[in-house]
Amino acid sequence: MAISDYASRSAPREREGSAVLAFVRRLDWVLFGAVVAVVAYGLWGVAGITRFEVEGDERYYVVRQAIAIGLGFAGLLVALAVDPERYRRAYRSIFGSTILLVLLVFPFADETRGAKRWIELGPFQFQPSEFGKLLFVLALAGFLADRARRLHEGRVVFQALALGAIPIALVFKQPDLGTALVYGAALLACLFVAGIRWPHFIGLLALGVASAVSVLVLLPRLGVELLEPYQKDRLTGFTQPDFDPGDTTYNVNQSITAIGSGGFDGRGVAGATQTRFGFTPESRTDFVFSSFAEQRGFVGAALLLGLYLLIVWRGLRVVTVARDAFGAIVAGGIVLAFLFQVFVNVGMTMGLAPVTGIPLPFVTVGGSSMVVNLLAMGVLLSIHARGSLGGRRAG
Amino acid sequence: MARNSAFNERRSSSGRFLPPDPRVAEPYRFTPQLALRVGMLGAVALAVFAALFLRLWALQVLSGDKYLVAARENQIRTVRVEAPRGPILDRNGLPLVTNIPGTAVQLWPADMPKQGRYRMVQRLASILHVRPAQITEAIEARRGDPLTPITVKSAVPWDRASYLKEHKSEFPGVSVVTTYLRNYEHRSLAAQILGHVGEISRDELKAKKADGYRGGDKIGKDGVESSFDSSLRGTAGLAQLRVDSLGRPQSPFQVQQFPAAGYGVRLTIDLKLQRAAEKAIRYGIERALENENWWANGGAIVALDPTDGEVLALASNPTFKPSVYVGRPVGKKLRALEAPEANYPLLNRATSGRYPPGSTFKPVTALAAMEEGILSPYQALQCTPVAYYGNDRQEFRNWNPNVNEAMTLPHALAASCDTYFYEVGNKFYGLPERRGQPLQRWARLFGFGQASGLDVGGEDAGLLPTIRWKRATYTKESYPKTWKIDRLWKPGDSIQLAIGQKDLLVTPLQMTRFYAILANGGKLVTPHLVSSVEQPGSADRPSVVLQRFAPTPPTQLPLTGEYLAAVQEGLSAATSESYGTSVGVFGSFPVPIYGKTGTAEKVVDGRLRDQSWWCGYGPEWGGRSAIALCALIENGGFGGEAAAPAALKVLEAHYGVRATVFAERASD
């Protein structure tokens, strides 16, 4: 029945033996501080960005975002309290619920802009695929941790890939290309951290590149279109931003103009005409960074990026201090997924990356994204708190 | 079933049958391999952030100013402010066309809602009484130019305009603006000369982009409006306003450059004479109908100043009101302007109608024959009821079968003896080949077979038949059965040409130009309609002439005075001697009038119908200028019955005196 290793048996003992104070002392306060800072900073940015969005209620989005933050921090504390070992043991159910969650969208969700991504829950919208990100990493890490010693076998790698492919395909089908790519990045990161052999990893990377090329270039030539035309335009549009200013790349050009016009110290809330008069597309969701950069300038945007870098750094550090393979893989998956999201989202607003609907962690207005990112940070902190400090083994 | 096996723990080699033993299971260690991998991930993260920072630096710090400008321009929309179009004036400065303010409804396609566009278009269309297709076609046509509005309709009634204003929020992208509408002060007067104004078409835009025309501009489509568009249109101003991304204005209009009103164009047309001429055509048609020429349904009158070619009146009937083009024109009304049932009101018959001239051409024949030495003016020829020419003794009849007397040239002109001119025509035919075709040569000198060079609008060149023309026209391909015969120049061709029949076609303007030669002693004038472009004056400020169009100096033709005098004598006798064809009309007119009737046979709808002509001139008299004049009534019967009375009306208006006795006569 029970699948366990050394860590699972030592964990309860450790928790019993630790005073709350000791636990608090073991927290990664730098990471926690960085998260609090980026959340507060993001909320401040959103306050400026959405000030003119709803006529007569300039705090409309700030209030909603604050509620989400409150929920998210509650979730973070819960995640902190939960021993990651529990996730590992339950990884099958977690995997099952990931699939269920992603499937939920199909019968219930409203079609927004041709995509089924949200489920209406009273006044709130719930985006299952966001929660799926975290569950996906946990389930995959559980699967890999249990096979930690056989990861050099191609068969195991293949099994992990097959397992991961199911939710990825479902999310892709919603269609939510961006989130599917995040899942893919998390999958690769988990495999990498879990320790699959280099040839396998390089082969996987090559496979990823080859499939991107074939989906975008080769198959259409043969008459097979897997992507909707708009998706393809977005993915390839950033390579030729002046090609089609009226449509797809219009958004990117407006976004670049907004960022550039922010200059060194920003145009302020009232003076940021690109945001204020709606030239910047999706200014509180996917393109939130361009509005942020327009209003706060290079100083403000660089500070935001700096905070992200801090989180990534501390997150990678969690990989190194993790108590067990599971913790390391989870931390690696979470951090890489986070890094991927930041890069693709910010890169997209500056014309460096293709346009995909990926939210900017902790800034984009949206409850699901905020809550799940804070939950993920909670898991990271929890792994850290139960891990070995400074790379030495704990307990 | 790969998935099942993946979950199947029992198949793992180490723990297949026994529970794992912590003593056997190796504890987790942070291996150097993992450290390497984390280090690599860290490197990737650093590289990613380095890329983002660099890009951010490049955008915001290095080219921030450039993007700031772009962001500012983003929200500024420059709009062209329409300039009022200049007026068109008659020779005395009386306005023919002016502007009135009107309400126009414009549509900015870029600002239309993404969803429910077509529903909005349909609603707009039903409010403005236009077809939805007209709007969608206009949107389609303006696809590449999202910043120029589409004028859905101008001259919108105020109640509909105010409805749209009140329901502005339901019609995003629709704006109600004030515009200038063309106002035709005298309704249909001079409609074919003035032309009309419309929105610039794609082709016109392509051709005129370099001249500052832009999509959505108004442009003259015809007549003076078209020929002098560059003077009339003025210069559009520029205004800017700040808009949001949906085009909703965020600031009031700020005029950057005020529009400059268009210049006035002064015509040589005399408003009173023009009105008289148009009335006279209707009168001529009435006369024709009264004389049971039931098919009389149109006509033209041209009046020139024979000294310099100024066009005093240029009338064409049937006519139309140019106001049908104002606003968004209704297709049905426009089609009616070109409809055969309405006898093509759009056609300017004075300049573009092609008619055989009939007897009004006889002075051409006479002058050419005398100059060529085959006719002596006072040597009498017998005017017989019928004459026979050619190897087959073809019969040529005189219009008047009751005459048989010897006539001099003036007498033959006055009585319009056909057989006299048949004889002359036959003499032309008999000339040796090396003499060429002198009748046609002279006719060409007099301006036939070519455009007169009028400065406004299109003109027809008519048709002057020659040997070469016949060869080119009648070919095996075009007339497979008869071409061998038809392509030959036969005696009948010369004989019929001498009395202005068969293939010869002229326009009333060409004809009038020729009679101006007789009036001014042998000078070919170039008719023109526009005398000057001027800055319109106001109540306390006279108008300023900016550009005066000096008439093209008349060309002196190599005519012998004696011969010219003989023709003039004949034309005078025609209106004053008892045997003259129009003495009944002009006999009691106080001013000595010179003129010639004509009754030209033309095939209309498969039947030969008589085109009623009168061409002539009057001298300077009682302070009024000399005038050369042609009147034509389509299918009007004898020249003396319809055209001559119509011409008299114009002359009465010109000289301000009236004929005391009127006794029209059925005479050619």
Image: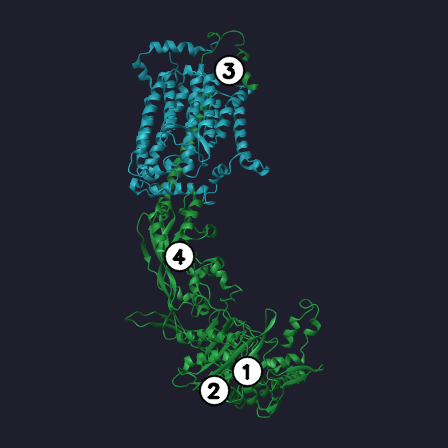
Image spot of residue A366 (x, y percent): 37, 30
Q: Colour of chain A?
A: cyan
Please, what secondary structure does the residue beneath circle 4 have?
loop
- The chosen color scheme is by chain
Left/right of residue A50 with respect to residue B195 in the rendered view: left
Question: Amino acid type of disc 2?
Answer: Gly
Which chain does the residue under circle 2 lie in?
A: B
Q: Amino acid at mark 4?
A: Ser
Q: Are marks 1 and 2 in contact (CB under 8 Å)?
A: no
At 56% across and 86% down in the image, what residue appears? Answer: B415
Report in which chain the residue with disc 3 lies: A
Image height of B459 relative to A137, above or below? below
Q: Mark 3–mark 4 contact, CB under 8 Å?
A: no
Q: Are marks 2 and 4 on the same chain?
A: yes
Image coordinates of residue A369 in percent, x first then y, are: 39, 28
Q: Which residue is mark 1?
A: B667
Badge 3 amino acid: Arg
**Which amino acid type corresponds to the residue marked 1 in the rendered image?**
Ser
| Vertical position of residue B363 compared to residue B212: above or below | below
Residue beneath the point at 38% across and 58% down: B155
Give the alpha-carbon distance from disc 3 to disc 4, as whole Å. 82 Å
Residue corresponding to mark 4: B154
Quick one: A376 or B600, which is closer to the camera? B600
User: How many other residues sit within 10 Å of disc 4, few (<14), some (14-19) or many (≥20)?
Assistant: many
Q: Residues within 10 Å of mark 3 (few under 14, many from 20)?
A: some
What chain is tagged by disc 1?
Answer: B
Q: Secondary structure at mark 2?
A: loop
Disc 4 versus disc 1: distance between alpha carbons?
52 Å
Whether the residues at callouts 2 and 3 have beta carbons within 8 Å, the answer is no
Q: Which mark is residue A149?
A: 3
Q: Earlier in the sequence, mark 1 or mark 2?
A: 2
